[in-house]
Image: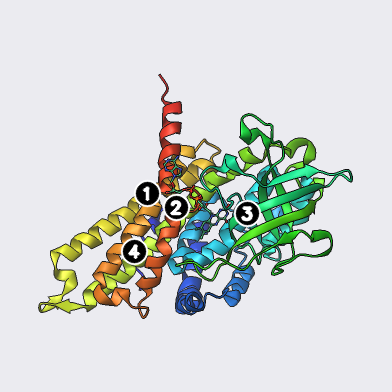
C-alpha cells in the first residue's frame, strides 16, 4: 500500500522518473522477498543483480565514467525508496557510494579511470572501514597501521570491525595509521584502497595477508554481511593510497570525515524510508483491526500515534533534503548533515516502535513485516556515528559558527 509521500510535488521530472522506477522496483522485487532473505540471513543476489542492471551502483558517478552523474539530493531520494523496501538493500549500495565519492573527490586520475567505470556497473563493489574492535566513535584511536617497505609497497597490519560488505566487496577504503608520532593523531592517517577477491575468506597471491573472518551474527540488518577484516602483512601498492602517495599520504582522516557528511545524509535517508514503511503498515493495519466495535484507527489514541509518525517523517525528510542540497551546492553542511542523521534515525526508531504497538500482538509475530523493521531500526542509531556523537558534532560546530 502506498501512502503518497507529499514530497513528490517537490521533485524535478528527472527525480520523479527515477524514484518512481525505484518505488516500483521495491514494490515488485524487494518487499515480496525481504522476509525470506532476512529469515535466512542470506545475500539477496537476484535483487542486487537487478540493481546493477538498473544502474543503481553508479547513480552519482559521472557519465564520463559510466554512471548517471546525479546529485546527492537525488541519491538520497533513491536511498529513501530502497530503504522503504529493506534497509539491508540500501546497505549494499551505501558503502559503495561512499567509496565512489572518495574516488571522485580525492582520487588521482588513474584511480578514477581504473575503478569508477567498474564501480558504476556494479562489477566492483566497495566497502569502507574505519571501526576496529576497540573503537568506533573515537576514530583517531585507530591502531591498524601501514609501514612503507623497501620495495615501495605499504604493509598493513591490524584488525578492522563491522565492515559492511566486508566479504563480497572487491575494494575496501581503509583508514589506517601511517605516522604514529603525528600530533594531532588525525594528521598521521591514510586511506588505502585495498583490493581483495570478492567472497574470499583468505586472499592469496599478491593479495595475501587479507583475511575475512565469518560474518557477524546480528539482530537485524540481515542479508548484507558485516565482518571483521584481518590485515596480516598485506602489501598495498603506493599507488593505492587515495589521492596518490605524494598528495594523499596522511590525509585520510580529513578525506573520510568529508565522506562521512555524505554518509550521514545517506543514513538519514534510510531512516526516512524505514519510517515511511512503518507508517504505511500502521495506517493500513489501523483501518483493518477492530476493537470495541470499531476500527482502531477510529480511536483517538491511535490517530495521535499516526499524526506523530507522519509529522516526524515529513520533518526528517525535509532535514535530509536540506542537508543534501547544501552539500550539492558545495556549502559546508556538517551541522545540517548531523541534524538530519540524528533526527531521521530517531524518527525511524520511533515510527518502528509506534507501528509495532499499533499492530498489537501481531507486531511481535514474524508473520508481520513490522517485526523485521523493528529489528532493523536500531542500526540507524549507531552507524555513521551514534546519536550521542551527532549531538557532540552539532554542538561543537554550532559553537564554532557562532563564536563570540
Ligand atoms: C551493523 C553495523 C554495520 C557497520 N558498518 C560499518 C562499516 O561499514 N564501516 C565502519 O567503519 N564501521 C561500521 N560500523 C561501526 C559503527 O560505525 C560503530 O559501531 C559506531 O561508530 C559506534 O562505535 P562503537 O560501536 O565502537 O561504540 P563506542 O564508540 O564504543 O560507543 C559506545 C557508546 O558510548 C557512546 N559514546 C562514545 N563516545 C562518547 C562521548 N564522547 N560522549 C558521549 N557518549 C559517547 C556512544 O554513543 C555509544 O552509545 C557498523 C556498525 C554496525 C552495528
According to the image, label 2 marks what residue? 268
- Quadrant housing residue 304: bottom left
Residue 325, given in percent of the width and then of the height, sits at 49, 44
**Position above or below: 223 against 233:** below
What distance separates the C-alpha of mark 2 from that of mark 4? 15 Å
Q: Is residue 20 visible?
A: no
The quarter in which the N terminus is drawn is bottom left
| 2 or 4: tag closer to the N-terminus | 2
| 3 or 1: tag closer to the N-terminus | 3
Disc 3 C-beta below 8 A from ligand 1: yes
Q: Residue at x 49, y 46 (%)?
A: 324
Q: Which residue is drawn at 36% across and 72% down?
A: 371
**For residue 385, side relative to residue 354 (left or right):** right
According to the image, label 4 marks what residue? 352
What distance separates the C-alpha of mark 4 from that of mark 1? 14 Å
Secondary-structure class at tag 1 = helix
**For residue 102, side relative to residue 148 (left or right):** left
Q: Which residue is drawn at 76% across and 58% down?
A: 209
Residue 25, given in percent of the width and then of the height, sits at 51, 72
Amino acid at each position: 500500500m502506498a501512502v503518497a509521500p507529499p514530497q513528490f510535488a517537490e521533485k524535478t521530472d528527472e527525480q520523479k522518473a527515477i524514484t518512481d522506477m525505484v518505488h516500483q522496483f521495491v514494490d515488485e522485487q524487494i518487499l515480496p522477498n525481504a522476509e525470506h532473505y532476512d529469515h535466512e540471513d542470506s545475500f539477496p543476489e537476484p535483487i542486487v543483480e537487478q540493481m546493477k542492471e538498473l544502474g543503481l551502483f553508479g547513480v552519482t558517478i559521472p557519465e564520463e565514467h559510466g554512471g548517471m552523474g546525479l546529485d546527492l539530493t537525488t541519491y538520497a531520494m533513491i536511498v529513501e525508496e530502497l530503504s522503504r523496501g529493506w534497509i539491508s538493500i540500501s546497505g549494499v549500495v551505501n558503502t559503495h557510494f561512499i567509496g565512489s565519492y572518495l574516488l571522485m573527490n580525492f582520487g588521482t586520475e588513474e584511480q578514477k579511470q581504473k575503478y569508477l567505470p567498474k564501480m558504476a556497473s556494479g562489477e566492483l563493489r566497495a566497502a569502507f572501514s574505519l571501526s576496529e574492535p576497540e573503537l568506533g566513535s573515537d576514530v583517531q584511536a585507530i591502531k591498524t597501521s601501514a609501514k612503507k617497505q623497501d620495495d615501495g609497497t605499504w604493509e598493513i597490519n591490524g584488525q578492522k570491525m563491522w565492515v559492511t560488505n566486508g566479504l563480497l566487496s572487491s575494494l575496501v577504503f581503509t583508514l589506517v595509521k601511517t605516522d604514529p608520532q603525528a600530533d594531532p593523531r588525525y594528521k598521521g592517517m591514510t586511506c588505502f584502497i585495498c583490493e581483495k577477491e570478492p567472497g574470499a575468506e583468505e586472499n592469496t597471491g599478491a593479495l595475501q595477508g587479507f583475511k575475512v573472518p565469518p560474518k557477524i551474527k546480528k539482530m537485524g540488518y540481515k542479508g548484507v554481511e558485516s565482518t571483521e577484516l584481518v590485515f596480516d602483512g598485506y602489501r598495498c601498492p603506493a599507488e593505492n593510497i587515495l589521492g596518490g602517495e605524494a598528495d594523499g599520504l596522511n590525509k585520510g582522516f580529513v578525506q573520510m570525515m568529508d565522506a562521512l557528511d555524505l554518509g550521514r545524509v545517506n543514513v538519514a535517508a534510510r531512516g526516512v524510508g524505514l519510517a515511511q514503511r512503518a507508517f504505511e503498515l500502521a495506517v493500513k493495519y489501523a483501518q483493518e483491526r477492530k476493537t470495541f466495535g470499531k476500527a482502531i484507527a477510529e480511536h483517538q489514541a491511535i490517530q495521535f500515534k499516526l499524526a506523530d509518525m507522519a509529522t516526524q517523517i515529513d520533518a526528517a525528510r525535509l532535514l535530509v533534503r536540506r542537508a543534501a542540497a547544501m552539500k550539492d551546492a558545495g556549502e559546508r553542511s556538517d551541522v545540517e548533515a548531523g541534524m538530519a542523521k540524528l533526527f531521521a534515525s530517531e524518527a525511524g526508531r520511533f515510527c518502528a516502535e509506534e507501528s509495532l504497538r499499533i499492530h498489537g500482538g501481531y507486531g511481535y509475530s514474524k508473520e508481520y513485516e513490522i517485526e523485521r523493521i523493528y529489528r532493523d531500526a536500531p542500526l540507524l542509531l549507531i552507524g555513521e556515528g551514534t546519536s550521542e556523537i551527532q549531538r557532540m558534532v552539532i554542538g561543537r560546530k554550532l559553537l564554532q559558527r557562532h563564536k563570540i
